[in-house]
Image (cartoon, helix red, strand yellow):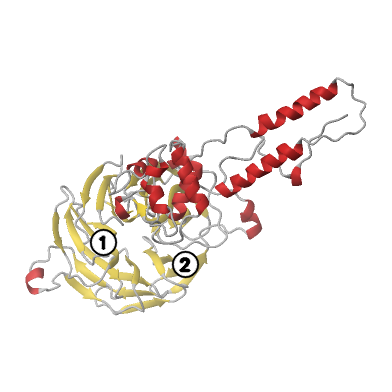
Amino acid sequence: MEISIPVLNQVRPDRRTLCFPSTLPASQEAGGARLGRALIFRGCAIRARRSLAPPFMVPMRLLMCALFPIIGFTNEAKPLSYYHDVVPILKQSCTGCHHPAKLKGELDLTTYGAFQKGGKHGPAFKPGQPDQSRVIEEISGEEPNMPKEGDPLTKDEVALIERWIKEGAKDDTPPEANSFKLIAPPVYAVLPVISAIALSPDGNTLAVSGYHEVLLHKSDGSGIIARLVGESTRVESVVFSPDGKRLAVGGGAPARFGEIQIWDVESHQESHSFKVGNDSVYGVSFSPDGELIAFGSADKTVRIISANDGRETMKFDNHSDWVLATAFTVDGKRLLSGGRDRAMKLINVANGQFIDDINKLLESVLCMARHPTQDLVAYGGDLGRPRIYRISENQGRTAANNDVNMIREFERQPGPVCSIAYSPDGNSIAVGNVDGEVRIYKTADGSRSATLKENQGAVFALKFHPTKNQLVTGGYDGKVRVFDVPEGKLVTAFDPVPIRTADKVASAPVASN
């Protein structure tokens, strides 16, 4: 007689436990248990057939068959994992309204510690006591209180969180969970939107934003020099230091963190990375001596850090909305910041003291550019009228409602102004708008000298070449274009990132975090 154990429907249990994984949703766990029982009762059926095996082998095989269900299916289910089982549910349905930048109910669900602490109603859960845990009360029932936006959690998801709490609600977040691990440069099937570009002071290197990276190109578009891959998924701002040796990159991961990266341009190595706040940063600028880096943030603050060690030297929180642009004065002693609250604020760099709003509050300040050699600033906003201001205290502004620092107002654009730049001599400005046009104006009289219409979609970034009569643009369509100015003739257009076909993308490694 020979004993055999048939396999039901060719379903394989987990090889490590000889049973189905314990981390499945409740409905799947129930199915696994039923299958396990089926294997126990049906899998040990004895089929008699002729065998040449010695007689003593039969009892041994009977014993093994009897032991198999004990070894394979009487094991207690493994405890649920906070990191692998609970966190995915929270990310899918909960953290959109409960993260550091949006603390509904004063509740943050982005980390175990914050989850355990709870919100304004106290701790979210009591380990071992799901029936006394507020989170279970909020997500359970026919009409659960949470989530308020989106679909309720499924019964399986509620049961999983309940079981995790009952098992002790242990934190198994790995130490490396919040660290960035570079596997390979990102792989692109389509061109990403270009949100920022920068030209080195010598004009030889062009930096272009990508996804998780900044790409360094030869400025004539003849080839990629290097790919600087970092943790930030979004790159919102790039700027070279005055000596061209360093590149500062501002961006982050929305609702998670802001980040300033500093790269060595020659070695292509990241020398420093500084996490800032809980949302992306914008409008990065170097001080004239290259020792300080200023930037704004979605958290309504302006910060200055040391370019050498990341030490915060100033924090300014007088804005009432996102801060999108910064610029140091020529002497580096004052800083100008602008954002969605419509104000361009002048700040003392040494102590962070607010000096004054230099402008009359007319429209959101979406972009700024300081004159190369003078304390003048050009800005663009959502009303589509570029303006040039003197960077000075606005004497009499409050009493008479006068815009005394405004020097020039230009014609209205087809839409909001997305980007603005001064020419190296300060005699021209280029203005990119949401409609895809780039217009070049003479600063002396405000007349238009050229109109560039080759861009398809909003122009989010543009820079004049420091040594040639050229303008580089980038934006929604993902193309980099180089124009001769003031003629407005297109010199070249190129893809800043390598594009792979769909079949190659499917199997290619990518950067992840």
The answer to whether residue 259 shows anywhere in this view is yes
Residue farthest to the top, as pictured: 56
- Between 250 and 496, the one nearer to me in the picture: 250
Image quadrant in which you'd find residue 187 = bottom right
Measured as percent of width and height from the top left, residue 372 is found at 27, 61
Q: Nearer the viewer, residue 165 or 395?
A: 165
- Expressed as whole percent of the image width and height from the top left, the position of residue 504 reads 64, 55
Residue at 71% x, 27% y is 67
Q: Quadrant of residue 360 in the image?
A: bottom left
> Where does the image place residue 81, in percent across and percent down from the top left?
50, 39
User: Seen in the image, is 214 located left or right of residue 502?
Assistant: left
Q: Which residue is mark 1?
A: 321
Residue 253 badge: none
Left or right position of 45 against 126: right
- Residue 251 image point, x, y percent: 38, 53
Q: Is residue 144 left or right of residue 361?
A: right
Judge whether 507 appears above or below 125 on screen: below
Mark 2 secondary-structure assignment: strand
Q: Is residue 36 above or below residue 345?
A: above
Residue type, mark 1 in image: Asp
Residue count near mark 2 (Cα–Cα under 10 Å), binned few <14, some 14–19, many ≥20: many
| Tag count | 2
Q: Name the residue that disc number 2 marks.
A: 481
C-alpha distance separating marks 1 and 2 = 33 Å
Q: Around disc 1, counting alpha carbons within 10 Å, would you say few (fewer than 14), some (14 to 19), or many (20 or more)?
A: some
